Image: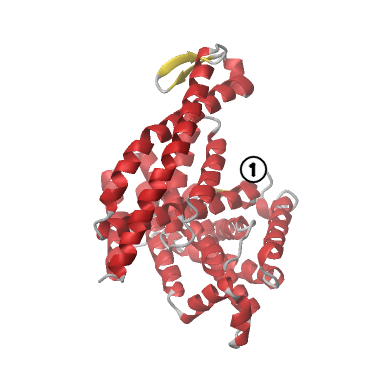
């Protein structure tokens, strides 16, 4: 039950989410989250499980999506009885084929060499998308109409709620399959290749072959995510092949936590929500993503999943109360830092970016401020300075509290 219960909870969450968040925008957001969960989990098969840092993983997501959307158009033109629920499998097989082909080149080496080769292959395919217009559609991309596909059990996947449940089904199946792979001897050997490839060779395994197989599996699930995106958006363009998409999935994996299977799931949900919500609020949303990534890598290398695991263990052992005083003292300083930093970013964005043509008056935290005046800048610098100074004095108390908690946990474990 300890193994089955989380999957039952995930299935229930997928089924019940549209009943709680029933608006059209919520269904669109949750559908995109499902696609990104599969994409992020496929990336973590490389990074978290096998130790391969790829800078071009969007290639397999995009190529899988393009093959899937061309397959949809071919099925529609030939009037074949193929339903939309089969299309993600087409994208997955396309990702598998391209992953095996490119993996023969890129998995010969690991480490920084692999990363550079993956970056080169990613840029090669991305730049080729503007040359091979018959396949990639140029800047406009390739479109389709999923409603013209054959129905499946009476569903034609015209409405967003039907598309959501299709994506949720494939998201659950792909997540379960990827988790099952991590529990196999092959998954354990991937962990061994990540930690010590020399010892893997000593026991008779080929690190390169293990990396190639893991790379191919990862490309398969990335292609399946691309197929889901083709169904959801009904369009694929060159942007979904480029470095921005690859950096986005890297951000999801790291922010969620590459050390836990649930980490990329959390990261995909958080980053997708922030991407949609922040882009409606500020044009500097990408800057916030960069700062978030730097903050997580610097101060929380285990990601959100790592932080949750630490606090969960403290709660289960009844030691979390020792953290409350230190957190209560540090919270105002953290809030001052965050507010001051946001104010400086938004004021600078209004003064230096294109928004300056709209005038210097703006709304910030519900107040009307003038970015051309000195007062808001002084307030922002003051809050940030006071917050940083306070954090420098109070953070040792947080570290001391965690030291006490960890010592108590070790005593109870002994």
Q: Is residue 144 visible?
A: no
In the image, farthest residue toward the bottom: 204
Q: Residue at x 59, y 75 (%)?
A: 196
Q: In this view of the protein, can residue 24 be seen by the observer?
A: yes
Judging depth in this view, the residue of 193 and 76 nearest the camera is 193
Locate residue 12 relative to residue 91 in the image: left or right: left
Q: Which of 214 and 260 is in front in this view?
A: 260
Mark 1 closeness class: few <14, some 14–19, many ≥20 residues within 10 Å: few
Q: Is mark 1 on a helix, strand or loop?
A: loop
Q: Residue at x 43, y 65 (%)?
A: 174
Residue behind mark 1: 140
Q: Which residue lies furthest to the top in this view?
A: 373
Residue at position x 69%, y 62% in the image? 112
**Residue 380, horizontal then vertical, whole percent:** 50, 22
Could you tell me residue 177's position as x and y percent? 43, 70
Q: Position of residue 322 (x, y in %)?
A: 29, 49
Q: In which quarter of the image is residue 64?
A: bottom right
- Residue 343 vertical placement versus 212 (above, below): above
Return the residue nearer the eye: 225 or 107.
107
């Amino acid at each position: 039950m300890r193994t089955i219960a989380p999957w039952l909870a995930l299935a229930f969450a997928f089924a019940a989410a549209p009943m709680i968040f029933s608006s059209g925008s919520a269904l669109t957001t949750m559908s995109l989250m499902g696609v990104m969960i599969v994409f992020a989990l496929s990336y973590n098969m490389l990074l978290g499980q096998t130790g391969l840092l790829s800078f071009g993983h969007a290639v397999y997501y995009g190529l899988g999506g393009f093959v899937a959307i061309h397959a949809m158009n071919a099925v529609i033109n030939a009037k074949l009885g193929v339903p939309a629920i089969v299309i993600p499998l087409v994208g997955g097989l396309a990702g598998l084929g391209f992953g095996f082909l490119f993996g023969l080149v890129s998995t010969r080496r690991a480490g920084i060499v692999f990363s550079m080769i993956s970056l080169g292959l990613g840029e090669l395919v991305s730049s080729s998308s503007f040359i091979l217009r018959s396949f990639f559609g140029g800047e406009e991309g390739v479109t389709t109409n999923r409603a013209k596909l054959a129905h499946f059990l009476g569903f034609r996947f015209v409405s967003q709620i039907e598309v959501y449940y299709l994506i949720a089904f494939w998201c659950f199946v792909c997540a379960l399959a990827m988790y099952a792979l991590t529990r196999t001897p092959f998954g354990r050997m991937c962990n061994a290749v990540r930690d010590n490839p020399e010892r893997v060779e000593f026991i008779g395994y080929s690190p390169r072959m293990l990396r190639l197989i893991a790379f191919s599996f990862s490309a398969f699930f990335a292609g399946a995510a691309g197929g889901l995106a083709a169904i959801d958006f009904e369009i694929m363009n060159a942007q979904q092949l480029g470095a921005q998409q690859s950096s986005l999935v890297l951000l999801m994996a790291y922010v969620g936590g590459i050390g836990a299977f649930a980490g990329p799931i959390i990261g995909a949900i958080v980053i997708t929500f922030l991407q949609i919500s922040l882009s409606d609020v500020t044009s500097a949303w990408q800057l916030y993503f960069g700062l978030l990534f730097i903050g997580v890598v610097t101060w929380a290398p285990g990601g959100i999943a790592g932080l949750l695991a630490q606090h969960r263990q403290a709660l289960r052992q009844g030691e979390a109360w020792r953290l409350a005083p230190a957190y209560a003292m540090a919270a105002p300083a953290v809030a001052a830092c965050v507010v001051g930093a946001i104010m400086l970013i938004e004021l600078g964005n209004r003064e230096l970016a294109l928004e300056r043509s709209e005038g210097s008056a703006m709304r910030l935290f519900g107040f009307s401020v003038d970015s051309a005046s000195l007062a808001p800048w002084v307030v922002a610098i003051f809050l940030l300075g006071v917050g940083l100074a306070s954090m420098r004095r109070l953070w040792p108390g947080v570290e001391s509290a965690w030291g006490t908690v960890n010592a108590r946990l070790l005593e109870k474990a002994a």
